[in-house]
Structure formats: structure tokens, C-alpha cells
Image (cartoon, rainbow, N blue to C red):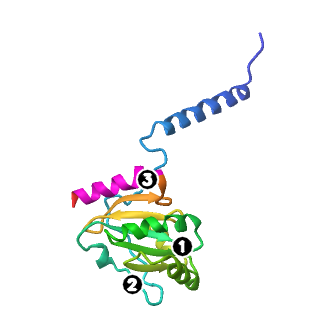
């Protein structure tokens, strides 16, 4: 009778472990959602800079009555450009605040001049420290905040197509109904 080496059992054990991990991942409620430790928490501090001629975004603004959005964006970000018309439409009915991430000032201003400025107020985050504080992985990311400046929902990715209508919009409608 041949003796089985423990090393021969390693590949099947690794395969079984990966299969279990994948099976667990497929069973989550929303496999595309990125969890945020900030849900239900007050919004983190904001960067204290803005673009020339723009209104500085402040913590007070985030605590004004009503639901509002905070959007991390950049002119160099193609998905940010893709979602820009959606932000422009949303800004007609709800305050949309922007945080320009790691963007040369001239490029950001040119982008807003060419495509329109949907932001009620803005901050700039030239070295990305604010994004780290908010837990942003990459632009665009949009946060829904309540009247007290608490984060209700985090959406990673552009607000377009099914992602917007099936994931983001229901969360926004839920937040607005609760106000």
C-alpha cells in the first residue's frame, strides 16, 4: 500500500477553501457594494480649500436641513465625466457638494466651465488626504447624507445606467422619504 504525502493533500484543500470563499461571496445581498464603516456616522472632516471663485464647502453645510450628496470627482477621471449629467440633474432638486480629488486647479476649472458646475459648494483635495478620511477608494464616489450630516449610503462608481437606477436611486428615495 502506497503512503500518501501530506503535500498531495494541499492542492485539494486550497481549492476547497477558495470554492467556499467564492460561494460565500456570491451569497451576499449586493456583491457589488463596498461596505463603509461610516454608515450612520457623522461625515468626516472636509478639506479646507476650494477652487478660485467657488464657494467653500463647510461642515455646517453638511448639517443643514434635508438630504444632500457629497461627490468625490476629478477632471482626469473618465467615469466622473460619464456621471456628470446625472449630477447636474440631481442638483436641480437636491444639494450636491463636490470634492475635487488630486486635480490640477486649471484642469478642474476648465472641466466645470465646459461641462457645467452642478456643485452648490466645493472643496479641493490636492493630495488625497480628505479622500482617505472619507474612505474613498477611487473617484467617483457619492455619499448620501441626512439633515444631521450623517452618512446614510456610499456609492462607489459612476451614477449611470442600471447602477444609478437600481442601486443609488432607491437609497436616495429612501433617505428623502425618511426626512
Q: Can residue 173 be spotted in the picture?
A: yes
- First-in-chain label (3 vs 1): 3
Q: Label for residue 74?
A: 1
Q: Residue at x 42, y 56 (%)?
A: 36
**Residue sitting at x 37%, y 55%:** 169
Label 3 or label 2, whichever comes before in sequence order: 3
Viewer-side label of 3, 1 = 1
Left or right: where 119 falls relative to 20: left
Q: Is residue 7 inside the magenta stretch?
A: no
Q: Position of residue 8 (x, y in %)?
A: 73, 26
Query: Does 179 appear above or below 170?
Result: below
User: From mark 3 to mark 1, how far is it between C-alphas?
Assistant: 23 Å
Q: Label 2: state its secondary structure.
A: loop
- The residue indicated by pointer 3 is 35
Question: Of 83 and 131, which appears nearest the observer?
Answer: 83
Q: Is residue 100 above or below residue 140?
A: below
Residue that numbered label 2 is attached to: 56
How far is disc 1 from disc 2 in space, using C-alphas?
Answer: 17 Å
Residue 104: where, in percent of width, then height? 58, 82
Judged left or right of residue 4, residue 115 is left
The picture places residue 152, in percent across and down from the top left corner, at 33, 59
Q: Residue furthest top?
A: 1
Quick one: quadrant of the N terminus?
A: top right
Q: Nearer the viewer, mark 3 or mark 2?
A: 2
Q: Residues within 10 Å of mark 1 (few under 14, many from 20)?
A: many
The magenta region covers 162-177
Q: Residues within 10 Å of mark 3 (few under 14, many from 20)?
A: few
Instruction: Name the residue at 39% across, 84% down.
Output: 56
Left or right: where 93 falls relative to 8: left
The image quarter containing residue 153 is bottom left
For residue 135, say whether it is visible.
no
Amino acid at each position: 500500500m502506497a503512503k500518501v504525502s501530506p503535500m498531495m493533500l494541499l492542492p485539494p484543500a486550497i481549492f476547497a477553501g477558495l470554492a467556499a470563499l467564492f460561494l460565500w461571496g456570491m451569497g451576499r445581498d449586493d456583491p457589488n457594494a463596498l461596505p463603509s464603516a461610516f454608515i450612520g456616522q457623522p461625515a468626516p472632516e472636509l478639506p479646507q480649500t476650494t477652487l478660485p471663485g467657488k464657494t467653500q464647502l463647510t461642515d455646517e453645510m453638511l448639517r443643514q436641513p434635508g438630504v444632500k450628496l457629497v461627490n468625490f470627482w476629478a477632471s482626469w477621471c473618465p467615469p466622473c465625466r460619464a456621471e456628470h449629467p446625472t449630477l447636474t440633474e440631481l442638483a436641480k432638486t437636491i444639494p450636491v457638494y463636490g470634492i475635487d480629488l488630486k486635480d490640477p486647479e486649471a484642469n478642474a476649472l476648465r472641466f466645470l466651465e465646459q461641462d457645467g458646475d452642478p456643485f452648490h459648494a466645493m472643496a479641493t483635495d490636492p493630495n488625497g488626504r480628505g479622500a482617505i478620511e472619507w474612505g474613498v477608494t477611487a473617484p467617483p464616489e457619492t455619499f448620501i447624507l441626512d439633515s444631521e450630516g450623517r452618512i446614510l449610503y456610499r456609492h462607489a462608481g459612476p451614477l449611470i445606467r442600471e447602477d444609478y437606477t437600481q442601486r443609488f436611486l432607491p437609497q436616495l428615495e429612501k433617505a428623502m422619504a425618511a426626512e
